[in-house]
Every structure is written in structure tokens, then in C-alpha cells.
Image (cartoon, helix red, strand yellow):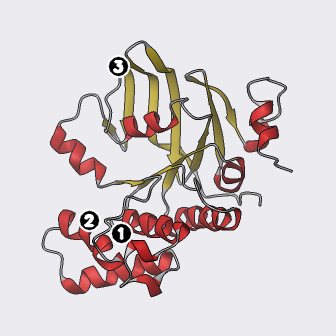
């Protein structure tokens, strides 16, 4: 289950974060984060629940505003751009939510059509159909096009959620706990899909997880978030080559061999 080497452009930073801090009242979640994401890279952010992993990607997507520090995404400084510019930037960023965030009252087709109709003014019915079939094929679920979300398994809903994100052809993908709540076999399938998306769409991705199998399968680099800062960054093996009492139990609990 080793990660295959990806085509990463280390001279092209698509996300650059410096000195990022975020608190909620007296609770200091992020305490000075520095992070780079390079073109074509899958970067895994690991950490225990409540360490600020999801807060980080909400800051990157503009859902939250930092207390201090800078976040540059695709050449845009998030602390200074206008709301209109932020709306345009969000179309270039795909956000795969932990709960898939599908509309229960819409078929799979309608769920996939919705972002296209909303964001691509003047798009034709033929173009919509082509895009819908393309992303369904990419996630291996063409047969579900007329089904309702309630008729899908958890893994299928996760795949359709990723397909709906891909339909706008984003340059950056943000995955929030992509394997949470799934059985081990389905987890492997989702991990393989994340790698397929990286190759097929040439995306750069941040994957938020506490699942070490996910981290090992999809991460070109891994960043361990501890006490509000990245304490260890490198390959999976480099991050866990330590006797640090905050890191080793995390590894042992996941039973990675």
C-alpha cells in the first residue's frame, strides 16, 4: 500500500501559509502554522481529534478568517482579497466534506448538475450531461445516476460527494476525513480514488485525517499537527521515525505493519 511517486512541481507553490494563528476565545487552536502545498502533491495533515485539522482547511477555503498570519492560495492572499474575488477562488478549490454534503431531495444526477448550473452561466444541456457522465465514470458509479442519496452506501455517497466536487474541475482538493465512518475495504477504495483523482485531474490536495492507513496510501508528504503547530513534516516513514511520546502511541494505536 505504498504511495506511488507523483509528478510534483516543487517550484510551484499553490498554497503558502506563514505564521497562521487561530483562537476561539481562550482556546488557541493554531499557534503559528507554516505550510506549503506544491503543484501535483497530496499533503496529509495528521492529528488527533480537536487539534485544529478541520479549522486549517476552513481557513484555506475562506470559511474562517485567521487571527494573524498569511494564507496565499493560487496567488491570492486571503487576508486582503475582496468577497467577490474569494467567491471566484472557491470555484477553483474543491472541498470534500466529511459527511459528503449531498442534497437528500435530489437524485445523484441533480446533485452533480447543481454546481454546474450555479457556477457556469450559459452552460448547455449537452455540456452538463457530458460533465455529469465524466465525473461519475471517474468515481466508478455511472450506474447510480438516477438514484437518491438514501439508496447509496456510505462509500458510494463519499464517492458521489467527490464527483460533485470534481465537476467544476478544481485545481486544489481539500479532503476532510475522507475515510471516516467507513469499513476497512471501502477505506482502501476511497484512498485509491484520491490517488486516481490526483493523477487524472492533476490536482494538488490537502487530506485531513487521523487514519494512518489513509496517510500512508495517499500522502506524498505528511505533516503531524501537535499542540497547534506542525511538529514533524516529511514522508510517512520520516514522520514516525521517532520516540516522541506524542507521536509513537498514535502510530501504535493504528496497528500499521
Circle 2 residue: 115
- Name the one closer to the observer, 179 or 88: 179
| Residue found 22% across the figure and 47% down from its top | 87
Find residue 247 and report its horizontal and vertical position in percent.
Answer: 75, 29
- Distance of mark 3 from mark 1, alpha carbons? 33 Å
Q: Write the residue at 40% across / 65% down.
A: 166
Q: Picture quarter containing residue 190?
A: bottom right
Residue under circle 3?
Answer: 67
Which residue appears farthest toward the top when viewing the image? Answer: 26
Marks 3 and 1 close (CB-CB < 8 Å): no
Residue 244 is left or right of residue 230, and the answer is right
State which quarter of the image contains the N terminus: bottom right
Q: Is residue 14 left or right of residue 222?
A: left
Q: Secondary structure at mark 3?
A: loop
Classify 10 Å Cα crowding around label 2: few (below 14), some (14-19), many (20 and above): some
Q: Residues within 10 Å of mark 1 (few under 14, many from 20)?
A: many
Q: Picture quarter containing residue 184?
A: bottom right
- Measure the C-alpha gap from mark 1 to mark 2: 8 Å
Q: Position of 219 compared to 201: left or right?
A: right
Q: Whole-percent x and y of residue 202?
A: 50, 62
Question: Is disc 3 surrounded by few (<14), some (14 to 19) or many (20+) residues within 10 Å?
Answer: few
Is residue 37 depicted above or below 138 in this figure? above
Residue 72's disc number:
none
* Residue 91 relative to residue 249: left or right: left
Q: Earlier in the sequence, mark 3 or mark 1?
A: 3
Q: Which residue is mark 1?
A: 167
Label 1 vs 2, first from the N-terminus: 2
SS class, disc 1: loop
| Farthest-out residue, left | 122
Q: Are circles 1 and 2 on residues that touch, CB within 8 Å? A: yes
* Image x and y of residue 220, in percent: 65, 49
Q: Is residue 114 above or below residue 48?
A: below
Amino acid at each position: 500500500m505504498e504511495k506511488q511517486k507523483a509528478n510534483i512541481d516543487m517550484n510551484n507553490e499553490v498554497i503558502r501559509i506563514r505564521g497562521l494563528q487561530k483562537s476561539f476565545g481562550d482556546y488557541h487552536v493554531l499557534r503559528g502554522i507554516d505550510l506549503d502545498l506544491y503543484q501535483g502533491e497530496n499533503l496529509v495533515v495528521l492529528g488527533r481529534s480537536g487539534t485544529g485539522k478541520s479549522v486549517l482547511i476552513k481557513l484555506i477555503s475562506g470559511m474562517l478568517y485567521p487571527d494573524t498570519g498569511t494564507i496565499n492560495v493560487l496567488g491570492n492572499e486571503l487576508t486582503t482579497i475582496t468577497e467577490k474575488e474569494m467567491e471566484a477562488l472557491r470555484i477553483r478549490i474543491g472541498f470534500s466534506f466529511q459527511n459528503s454534503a449531498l442534497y437528500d431531495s435530489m437524485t445523484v444526477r441533480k446533485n452533480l448538475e447543481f454546481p454546474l448550473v450555479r457556477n457556469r452561466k450559459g452552460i448547455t444541456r449537452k455540456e452538463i450531461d457530458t460533465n455529469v457522465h465524466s465525473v461519475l465514470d471517474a468515481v466508478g458509479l455511472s450506474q447510480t445516476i438516477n438514484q437518491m442519496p438514501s439508496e447509496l452506501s456510505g462509500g458510494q455517497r463519499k464517492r458521489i460527494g467527490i464527483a460533485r466536487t470534481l465537476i467544476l474541475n478544481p485545481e486544489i482538493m481539500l479532503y476532510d476525513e475522507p475515510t471516516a465512518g467507513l469499513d476497512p475495504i471501502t477505506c482502501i477504495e476511497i484512498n485509491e480514488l484520491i490517488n486516481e483523482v490526483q493523477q487524472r485531474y492533476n490536482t494538488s490536495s490537502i487530506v485531513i485525517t487521523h487514519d494512518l492507513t489513509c496517510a500512508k496510501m495517499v500522502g506524498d508528504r505528511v505533516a503531524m499537527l501537535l499542540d497547534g503547530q506542525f511538529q514533524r513534516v516529511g514522508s510517512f516513514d520520516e514522520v514516525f521515525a521517532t520516540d516522541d511520546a506524542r507521536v509513537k502511541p498514535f502510530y501504535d494505536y493504528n496497528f500499521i505493519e
